[in-house]
Image (cartoon, rainbow, N blue to C red):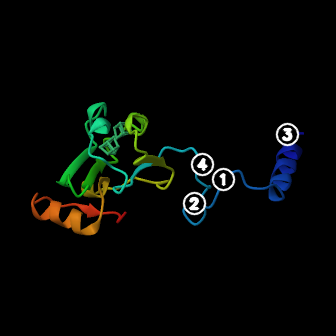
């Protein structure tokens, strides 16, 4: 009786849709409201620093290149962020957004977690004056 049950299960499962996916060849779509990574729009930033003030992990930093010319670079570490979105709620100028852009953020290299947002020339200026390794992730 048991053997018949096993055979029955085996045959049925041959025609059943697999419960698993062929990762990493295939991946599930990222949920729309998934909190994966901050986005920064430097052109909207006023340099008020409110986002930095309440960040519980002190991982977000607005670097002022030229306040008058509204030139800012945001540094942010994915590995330190707890995705609370406090910075997004604090920003009254809509310069910060939480996105679902990064589905997988595992890495064995620390520097891949450090992100610089802003115009390339501003990031370059900041790095030239900071003397620290970084990964340039975007140009807004
Ligand atoms: S989401 Fe939270 S932890 Fe991450 S940078 Fe913003 S305030 Fe900081
Ligand atoms: S709260 Fe918004 S406008 Fe103010 S410094 Fe942060 S990102 Fe810029």
First in sequence: mark 1 vs mark 3: 3
Q: Which mark is residue 2?
A: 3
Residue depicted at 57% across the width and 60% down the height? 23
In the rendered structure, which disc, 1 or 4, sits on the residue that comes first in sequence? 1
Give the distance between the C-alpha atoms of the residues marked 2 and 4, in whole angstroms: 20 Å
Q: Are marks 2 and 1 in contact (CB under 8 Å)?
A: yes
Which of the two marks, 2 or 4, is nearer to us in this view? 4
| Cα gap from disc 4 to disc 3, whole angstroms | 45 Å
Callout 1: helix, strand or loop? Answer: loop
Q: Report the residue marked by disc 2.
A: 23
- x, y (%) of residue 100? 51, 51
The answer to whether residue 60 is left or right of residue 104 is left
Q: Residue 24 placed where, x, y %?
A: 54, 62
To which quarter of the image does residue 84 belong? top left
The kind of secondary structure element at disc 2 is: loop
Q: Which numbered disc flags the more N-terminal residue, 2 or 3?
A: 3
Give the secondary structure at mark 3.
helix
Distance from label 2 to label 1 (Cα)? 8 Å
Q: CA distance from mark 2 to mark 3?
A: 33 Å
Screen quadrant of the C terminus: bottom left
**Mark number, residue 120:** none
Tell me the residue that label 4 is attached to.
32
CB atoms at circles 1 and 3 under 8 Å apart? no
**How many tags in the picture?**
4
Residue bearing mark 1: 20
């Amino acid at each position: 009786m048991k053997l018949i049950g096993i055979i029955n299960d085996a045959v049925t499962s041959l025609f059943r849709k697999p419960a698993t996916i062929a990762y990493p060849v295939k991946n599930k779509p990222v949920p729309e409201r998934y909190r994966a990574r901050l986005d920064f729009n430097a052109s909207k930033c006023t340099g008020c620093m409110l986002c930095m003030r309440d960040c519980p992990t002190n991982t977000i930093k607005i670097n002022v290149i030229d306040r008058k010319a509204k030139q800012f670079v945001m540094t942010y570490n994915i590995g330190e962020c707890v995705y609370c979105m406090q910075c997004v709620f604090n920003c009254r100028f809509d310069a910060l957004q939480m996105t679902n852009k990064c589905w997988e953020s595992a890495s064995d290299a620390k520097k891949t977690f450090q992100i610089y947002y802003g115009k390339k020339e501003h990031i370059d200026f900041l790095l030239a004056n900071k003397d620290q390794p970084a990964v340039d992730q975007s140009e807004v």
